[in-house]
Image (cartoon, rainbow, N blue to C red):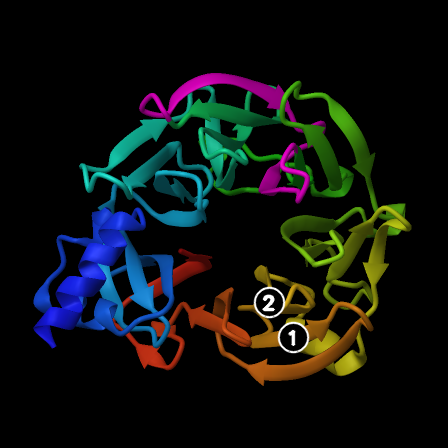
């Protein structure tokens, strides 16, 4: 088996994953037989935080400590880094360099900004865009960081909304799609939501080159308390958005929306069983590798729902208590839970809300 491990490790170095080469023998063995790698943030039983690299079976290959609780990630085939972002209202991010295996690079927002836990690389991997809160004014901004120069912050532009959460780069490679969740917060008040009666969530399309607003989209006023949070893009370039409802749980409201050129932003009414399973809370969404199947995970509903994006028809509803992380793998999905389950493996930790595919 040793020669297989060494061959795989040499391949990974050439493929830009040299940062995984400092593995334990057990980690190297797992890596040698793994076709998929994932990243997920965790909290261990002692309250320490970190990022784990896992294989498709949910076995931990490597871990890296974080200075606080992590949330989402930015990674790209063209980027030299995997970036882990702090959970709101944290102001740190940690970049794990893939090519050289060098020490992680920690960087921070300016003093009057904090991260919202998500970001995305430019098409060439040289620039990182991060969702941030300009908390003195309440404006959402996209911080711009130079990935070729220690993640120096080189600028920002407005998201034209409040509370930007997930951001994705559209298939044209030059347009950012930003989910403005609509909820104002301030770090002096922790995670307290300050403007629920006047929430105004939106989806903004922004030119990465100029920062100019290309278009902004909102749902009908009766859905103004559906915070638009997480997104995935299908093979037809439609954006699917998972929401989290901040109103009366007895209200009859959807949890899913879709943005397309043909229809704009529209709410998606799911069948009653699927809607009940999600409990008006989409914690994470992921598009399958087929570009057609969408997975929606809800820690509050305790389920993962998969949907055919062509017909809008749910394909399956899987009970998954306290699960939030979900990501594509093969012809299906992998999910993780706050109780330590990742795929079919169980770990003595609490997984955070998102899974990145490496």
- Give me the residue at 33% from left, 28% from top: 107
- Give me the residue at 76% from left, 53% from top: 238
Q: Tell me the magenta residue range.
A: 148-174
Q: CA distance from mark 2 to mark 1?
A: 9 Å
Q: Quadrant of residue 257?
A: bottom right
- Give me the residue at 31% from left, 24% from top: 150
Q: Quadrant of residue 213?
A: top right
Above or below residue 48? Residue 302 is below
| Marks 2, 1: nearer the viewer | 2
Frontmost residue, 342 versus 250: 342
Residue 133 falls left or right of residue 162: left
Would you call the spot at circle 2 few (<14 residues within 10 Å), some (14-19), or many (20 or more)?
A: many
- Give me the residue at 79% from left, 63% from top: 254
* Residue 141 visible to the viewer: yes
Residue 234: mark in rendering: none
Above or below residue 186? Residue 81 is below
Question: What is the number of callouts on the image?
Answer: 2
Find disc 1 in the rendering and name its residue: 306
Would you call the spot at circle 1 few (<14 residues within 10 Å), some (14-19), or many (20 or more)?
A: many
Frontmost residue, 59 versus 305: 59
Residue 19 falls left or right of residue 87: left
* Residue 48 visible to the viewer: no
Find disc 2 in the rendering and name its residue: 288
Residue 245 falls left or right of residue 166: right
Q: Position of residue 79 (x, y in %)?
A: 41, 39
């Amino acid at each position: 088996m040793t020669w297989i491990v060494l061959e795989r490790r040499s391949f990974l170095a050439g493929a830009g994953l040299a940062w995984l080469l400092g593995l334990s023998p057990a980690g190297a063995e797992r890596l040698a037989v793994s076709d998929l790698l994932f990243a997920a943030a965790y909290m261990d039983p002692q309250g320490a935080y970190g990022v784990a690299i896992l294989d498709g079976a949910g076995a931990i290959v490597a871990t890296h400590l974080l200075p606080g609780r992590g949330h989402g990630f930015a990674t790209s085939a063209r980027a030299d880094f995997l970036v882990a972002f702090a959970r709101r209202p944290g102001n740190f991010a940690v970049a794990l360099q893939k090519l050289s295996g060098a020490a992680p690079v920690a960087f921070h927002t300016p003093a009057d900004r904090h991260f919202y836990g998500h970001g995305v690389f430019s098409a060439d991997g040289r620039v990182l865009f991060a969702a941030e809160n300009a908390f003195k004014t309440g404006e959402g901004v996209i911080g711009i960081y130079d990935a070729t120069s220690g993640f120096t912050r080189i600028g920002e532009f407005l998201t034209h909304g409040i509370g930007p959460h997930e951001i994705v780069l559209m298939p044209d490679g030059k347009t950012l799609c930003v989910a403005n969740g609509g909820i104002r917060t301030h770090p002096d008040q922790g995670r307290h939501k300050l403007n629920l009666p006047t929430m105004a969530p939106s989806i903004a399309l922004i030119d990465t080159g100029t920062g100019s607003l290309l278009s902004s989209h909102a749902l009908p006023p009766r859905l103004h308390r559906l915070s638009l949070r997480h997104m995935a893009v299908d093979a037809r370039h439609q954006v699917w958005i998972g929401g989290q409802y901040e109103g009366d749980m007895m209200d009859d409201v959807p949890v899913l929306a879709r943005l397309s050129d043909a229809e704009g932003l529209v709410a998606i009414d799911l069948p009653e069983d699927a809607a009940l399973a999600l409990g008006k809370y989409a914690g994470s969404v992921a598009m399958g590798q087929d570009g057609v199947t969408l997975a929606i995970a809800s820690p509050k509903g305790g389920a993962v729902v998969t949907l055919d994006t062509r017909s809008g028809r749910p394909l399956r509803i899987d009970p998954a208590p306290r699960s939030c992380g979900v990501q594509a793998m093969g012809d299906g999905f992998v999910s993780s839970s706050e109780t330590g389950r990742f795929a079919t493996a169980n770990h003595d930790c609490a997984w955070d809300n998102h899974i990145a595919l490496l």
